[in-house]
Image (cartoon, rainbow, N blue to C red):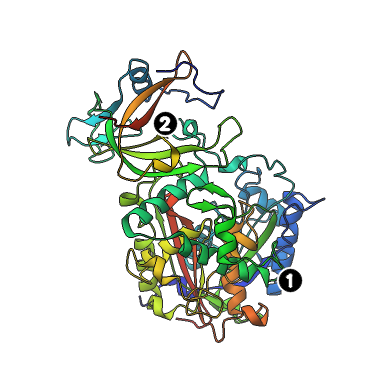
Amino acid sequence: MSDQARSPIPLPVPTQISSPHWEGCRKGELRVQQCGSCGGYVFIPQSFCTHCFSKDLRWVVSSGRGVVYSCTTIHRPQRIEFEVPYTVAIVELSEGWHMLSNIIECAHEDIKVGMPVEVVFQKMSDEITLPMFRPVTE
Amino acid sequence: MAGNPLHGVAIVAAYNTRQAKVLEGETDLSIIHDAVDGALKMAGIAREEVDGVNISTLRGGVSSRNGVHMMGGRPSWCGNSEMGIASVLEAASAIATGQCETAILASGQAGMYKDRSATSPWTRPSNEFVECWGLYTAAEFALIAKRHMALYGTRPESLAEVASAIRMNGARFPEAVFYGREVTPQDVLDSRMVADPYHLLDCAMNSEGGGAVILTSAEKAKDLDVDPIYLLGGALDRQGMSYVTAPVWDKYGHVGQRAAKITFEQAGLTPEDVDVCEFYDPFSFELIRQFEAFGFCEEGEGGDFVMGGTVRSDGKFPLCTNGGLMSFSHCGVIQMLQKVISGAQQLWGMYPDELTVPDAKVAMVTNGGAGALFTDTMLIGKEMP
């Protein structure tokens, strides 16, 4: 875990609904909502299950392991605070849900769809730790 | 579909103002004025005859009720849908149900975007699960394209062919912002990378401009000195907020398929009947995806489908015949309606000879894309269905 890894980029402002996710990241856990009724995973955080409409959502801890579902290496930044190149990916977690993130600790040209990755937490501020992903090494 | 009320509505004006990278000395309102004025003159309709209004800007603070005031403040039907196929279908519904007889749709943007050091501000998401990873519109659409390329082996050369075909149309269209700028597929591949697989020339540009459309009942259209363009069918596919959830191909890659099926059924037509494809072209792969989703070819075959001149101006399915968002104009508030405008103008034979599709009777118009989780479709034609 690196401290203040990058220059200031726009950081998430947690909401009442999303706070447990960000709290998990601070503690080194990738938390996601799971429906107590249908078992489906829900991300981004919601007030009710988008699969079955139940309000019985519970926070669980993901394995933090998955594969790169899709990825793009960015050469023109969203804003100048992002240092190029950087790689944005959709990660498919082992539980079958998807999230956007960055792939780090890997040469950009080596990042491929289907590549196994694991979560690595990057502390950005006292409140925000971002879950990024790196190749599974072993 | 017999008796579809949409079929009783016609386009009687489709007008673009001047478009430019920057419209010096203009404002949103001055451009909107020119768009409305141009459309009224084109239809030969007095301002007082308009009893339905959707004149609005997404970000510029002009609401449709401001628009009613601009039109004279008479009691009028007032639309609120996003400018484009959605606003056309909303106004057509109002006409078909007798809430108004003649509706004007207009928008425009000027004097807004000057900073070229990073992406346009309105392409940057603010969502807490998107912004911090450095995403923006091109990245969202790149994630869709890259999945398709991994699944089906779609090649950058196919993307470049699409971008070149569209940009070559704009190069020959005098009103296009990039008029005269010819672009080969190799030029696209050689342009600098923005968000892999998208090079600069795979992406839409940013510009300024305005436009307007006037719709009226087919009955009233007969009294005008204009060949009506009829609404043959149209539908919206929306799957959620743009740029909030990850654009996962399995869930969102086919957006527009349902809408296109409905649209073709309403029109009693198939993709084979389409003479002109005025598809939404924010990024090159999105066109390949749309041809697949709408049934012009099978899923995974879009990359091959667009090769061999199929989508060039003299091909079987001419694409974005005025240069589209890549070469004609893309200002962020009117560009979706400009697809309708382009389809109508092509059917009216208003384009230069070398861009005119001979005997074109049916145009397919689309808005949106998988990276934004929505795709709307519409068919318009010269003959009443």
Tell me if residue B188 comes above or below residue B143 in the rendering.
below
Distance of mark 1 from mark 2, alpha carbons?
Answer: 58 Å
Using the image, name the chain to which the residue with label 1 belongs: B
The residue lying at 51 percent from left, 66 percent from top is B162
Q: Kindly indicate the quadrant of the structure image that contains residue B46.
A: bottom right
The spot of residue B38 in percent (x, y) is 73, 67
Q: Nearer the viewer, mark 1 or mark 2?
A: 2
User: In this view of the protein, can residue A56 be seen by the observer?
Assistant: yes
Query: In the displayed image of the protein, which residue is found farthest to the top?
Result: A126
User: In this view of the protein, can residue B225 be seen by the observer?
Assistant: no
Tell me if residue B52 comes above or below residue A77 in the rendering.
below
The one of B127 and A53 positioned closer to us in this rendering: B127
* Residue to which mark 2 is pinned: A104
- Residue type, mark 2 in image: Ile
Query: In the displayed image of the protein, which residue is found farthest to the right?
Result: B25
Considering the numbered disc 1 on the image, is that residue within a helix, a strand or a loop?
helix
The residue lying at 45 percent from left, 35 percent from top is B130
The residue lying at 56 percent from left, 23 percent from top is A7
With A109 as the anchor, is B103 left or right in this view?
right
With A58 as the anchor, is B277 left or right in this view?
right
Q: Kindly indicate the quadrant of the structure image that contains residue B53.
A: bottom right
* Residue to which mark 1 is pinned: B41
With B309 as the anchor, is A66 left or right in this view?
left
Discs 1, 2: same chain: no
Give the quadrant of the C terminus of chain B. Answer: bottom left
